[in-house]
Amino acid sequence: MDALVDRLDRIRGTVAPRNHNARTIAALTNNPGCGRRGLMDAAGVNKGAVAGQLGFPAAFGQSRFAIARGNAFEAQVKADGAAELLQLLRERLGLAIPEVAYDDLSNVGGNASREVRYARTRSLLARAAAEREDAGTLFDHPMLRLDIAGYYAYLEPDLIAFRAGGRFHVVEIKSFAVIDGQADPGKAAAAAKQSAVYVLAMRELLGELGHPPESVSHNVVLVCPENFANRPIATLVDVRKQLTVLQRQLSRLTRLDKILDALPAGLSFDLAYDADHNATRHPDELRKAVSAIDARYNPDCLGSCEMAFFCRDESAGSTSALGRSIRDDLGGVESVSTVLGLARGTLPPGAGQEEIAGLLRLAHRLRTECLQEAGAA
């Protein structure tokens, strides 16, 4: 693992790595065949900065107002040792938490490194899982990690994990409102998927310590503001479906060592920042480095990856740019010009293309007849 980390550090360059979070892992599993995103995320590359240097900047992420609102709501819920959260857990969800011990794992004795925080998190959760009398009950900002295609991605969750009734639970604090008992479906679904990432990471940690997956509950506590006030409300969300999808998609990711072995020696995404933190790497040189890694663009990438506009431009004329379902329906024909040639009969089908060529010619003939009838009418 150390040799792999060294290779990723060289690829990233001189800047510090960007941490994974549940949102980036969920997005990565949406497109498990994309080696480019897999490598750049594994190396902790700032994809937004790379895309900007290539001339394809993407307005991405939350607004600073949304971030400020979320931070304020989180601070409210966690104030005084998470007193308000405890009240929700006890009264609204009926969870028996007779005594409370609170551990803040955002740093360890002033050390905020990922490895130190993970070691401390592992130690405290191991003690709690062994049902020690002095074990903690609430764990704020535990550092977790998840095996992603052969490397460890560290997760810095914006959550509290707590233990009650012999099981650990994940708490996800979100600032979107629950109005009249209903939350925005898209935001709620995203929160459930991100929470599943944390549940899986905690299960892996406890599994290494000899505890079964059931030690971490599949019911996640989602805390949101209620109606138009800032008063929090807690809801239990079952993430078993999201866990199943996540595990299946992670198993489909191309292993990182295979991607690295196919790369040219000395490849780097270093932007060569000067003393004023201005990128000096020539865009043409950077484009050559990025293009050395196979990508698998589809329109869904526009909502989940900072490199999407560059990859879309690069894939112009390919069937993948039309969407995953269309690409699959075309039976692996990669070029739009090839599709049109097969449909019009101006291009003979290659090996294995006979069936799709027949379907394309039929579709082209039907389209022509419909247009002619519409013109005659």
Image: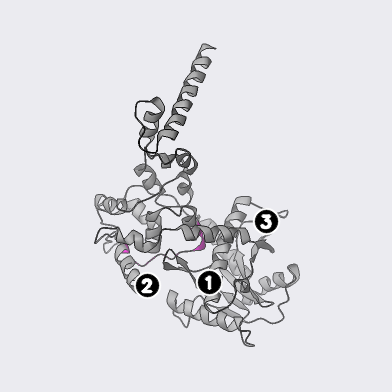
Q: From mark 1 to mark 2, how far is it between C-alphas? A: 17 Å
Q: Around disc 3, counting alpha carbons within 10 Å, would you say few (fewer than 14), some (14 to 19), or many (20 or more)? A: some
Residue 20 belongs to the span the image colors magenta: yes
Q: Is residue 13 above or below residue 296?
A: below
Q: Nearer the viewer, residue 159 or 43?
A: 43
Q: Nearer the viewer, residue 369 or 157?
A: 369
Residue identified by numbered label 2: 1
Residue identified by numbered label 3: 178
- Foreground mark, 1 or 3, reads 1
Q: Around disc 1, counting alpha carbons within 10 Å, would you say few (fewer than 14), some (14 to 19), or many (20 or more)? A: many
Q: Percent position (x, y) of residue 282?
A: 24, 53
Q: From mark 2 to mark 3, how far is it between C-alphas? A: 43 Å
Quadrant in which the N terminus appears: bottom left
Query: Residue at the spot x=33%, y=53% of the render?
Result: 293
Which amino acid lies under the numbered mark 3 shown in the image of this protein? Val
* Quarter assignment of residue 257: bottom left
Residue identified by numbered label 1: 204
Q: From mark 1 to mark 3, how far is it between C-alphas? A: 32 Å
Which element carries disc 2, helix, strand or loop?
loop
Which element carries disc 1, helix, strand or loop?
helix
Instruction: State which tag comes first along the sequence, 1 or 3.
Output: 3
Instruction: State which tag comes first along the sequence, 1 or 2.
Output: 2
Point out the residue furthest to the bottom here: 133
Q: Is residue 107 above or below residue 374?
A: below
Q: Percent position (x, y) of residue 235?
A: 69, 62
Which amino acid lies under the numbered mark 2 shown in the image of this protein? Met
Q: Is residue 296 above or below residue 203?
A: above
- Foreground mark, 2 or 3, reads 2
Magenta stretch, main secondary structure class: loop
Q: Percent position (x, y) of residue 61?
A: 48, 55
Query: Residue at the spot x=38%, y=62% of the render?
Result: 256
Q: Which residues are magenta?
A: 12-26
